[in-house]
Amino acid sequence: MEAQSTSLNYLPIIFQLLVALGFVVFTMTLTHLIGPKRKTADKLVAFESGIKSIGNARQPFSIKYFLVAILFVLFDVEVIFMYPWAVNFREFGLNGLIEMFIFMGTLLLGFIYIIKKRALDWD
Amino acid sequence: MSTTIYYILMIAILLFVLTTIAAWLIWLERRVLALWQDRYGPNRAGPFGLFIVVADTIKLFFKEDWIPPFADKFIFVIAPAIVAAAVLMSFVVVPFAPGIVVADLNIGLLFFLAMSSLGVYSIVLGGWASNNKYSLLGALRGASQMISYEVFMGLSLMGVVMLSGSFRLTDIVLAQQDYWFIVTQPVGFVIFLIAGVAETHRLPFDIPEAESELVAGFHSEYSGMKFGMFFIGEYLGVILISSMVVTLFFGGWLGPSFLPGVVWFFLKTFVFILFFILLRASLPRPRYDQLMEYGWKVLLPLALLNLLITGAVVLVMKE
């Protein structure tokens, strides 16, 4: 068994977070302060390839993107179950492997179902 | 106390080295692309055009920091910050050489996966907050591309985890002393590489920003240093994916002892960075639906199969 990470191991991550945020905030604030500020009429409207922009982007979009997001949630949760199994599977041995076969079988059934339902086809 | 100073020193060096490499990588990419396409590339400022990076950086700093009046201002500003910060965070767990790692977590691989998936927020938020139709399309495509490829990105690495029995990246490197995991995990390697290209939305999978149709997609409305943050994030992402490929499949710092481990690590990483650029130079961009279909219907089942076969083989070998 490997040793548990103590809270001290996570200290550098907090440092790194502070440094990364500091770097980003510093550069973005600096350029905000030293850059010029000019408001011309063309900059005040959204870019639409040079033609007059019509309306704004707060419009309905294809439901397919939402479907992909739902499928991602489903599959990612199922995939996450495999992570702890993968790291410990030597202890679980053959039984664990058979159980994982069954689990993936049910996963595969769902997968075949969404393919049959044409949820992954973009027409 | 001394360990705290050590951490701070490590992090400072890491930040400096990474941003420097990312900046010169832009020069390298333009030069190497030019070489492969029979052009000159930037060759005026300084020797081999090296100082173009300095000129670009100064120019970026003095550009107008433009926030469009039609945008969601707060979200518009934090979106580029998320990507740069998240990628910098991921480097915490990368072992450059024995002892040269900021945080040797026992869940290092999971930390990497978690941080790399944060990048999708910057695309969605940036594209949405821009309130531009091109940006919205780019953001939606980018989001569905990244979340789709994320599913089996982690899955493709589980073969490596099974062979080494640990999420700790130094353990994974040390488990490759006899042979590199590319030998036993070629399928996992290919899947991870493809997913990595898609996660960093580099060409040929740059569908969220597809210049020829979406005019830079999710960052159409960005300029100045906020655009620079997306840019730095992208190049840091290339370095990150390359160094993870090296760590997980090509033995990390391991190599013949006439060179120190860090040098081996950077040499191997450099090869994969060049490979990323070669991909950009040689491949056309697939259509969005082709990309999604390929991911879900080919790579996901392949990753599952790879996992099961690896498990079965390891158990048989153990008997």
Image (cartoon, grey):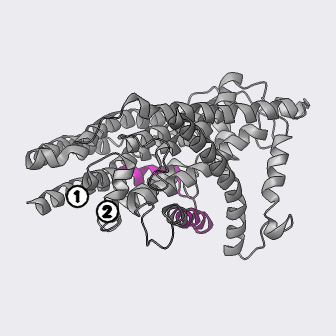
x and y percent of residue B139 in the render? 59, 38
Q: Can you tell which mark lies on residue B32?
A: none
**What residue lies at 45% left-to-right and 43% top-to-bottom?**
B112
Magenta range is B269-296
Question: Is residue B287 found inside the magenta-colored segment of the image?
Answer: yes
A117 or B86, which is in the foreground?
B86
Q: Amino acid at mark 2?
A: Gln
x and y percent of residue B189 in the render? 38, 60
Asked whether the residues under the numbered discs 1 and 2 touch, taking CB atoms below 8 Å apart as contact, a structural biologist would say: yes
Q: Amino acid at mark 1?
A: Thr
User: Image check: B110 left or right of B125?
Assistant: left
For mark 2, name the chain.
Answer: B
The quarter of the image holding the C terminus of chain B is bottom left
Main secondary-structure element of the magenta-colored stretch = helix
Q: Can you tell which mark lies on residue B310?
A: 1
Quarter holding residue B35? bottom right
Residue under pointer 2: B185
For mark 1, name the chain.
Answer: B
Q: Earlier in the sequence, mark 1 or mark 2?
A: 2
**What residue lies at 78% left-to-right and 63% top-to-bottom?**
B50
User: Image check: B242 left or right of A77?
Assistant: right
Question: Is residue A74 found inside the magenta-colored segment of the image?
Answer: no
Q: Is residue A34 visible?
A: yes
Local secondary structure at mark 2 = loop
Quarter holding residue A47? top right
A123 or B89, which is in the foreground?
B89
Local secondary structure at mark 1 = helix
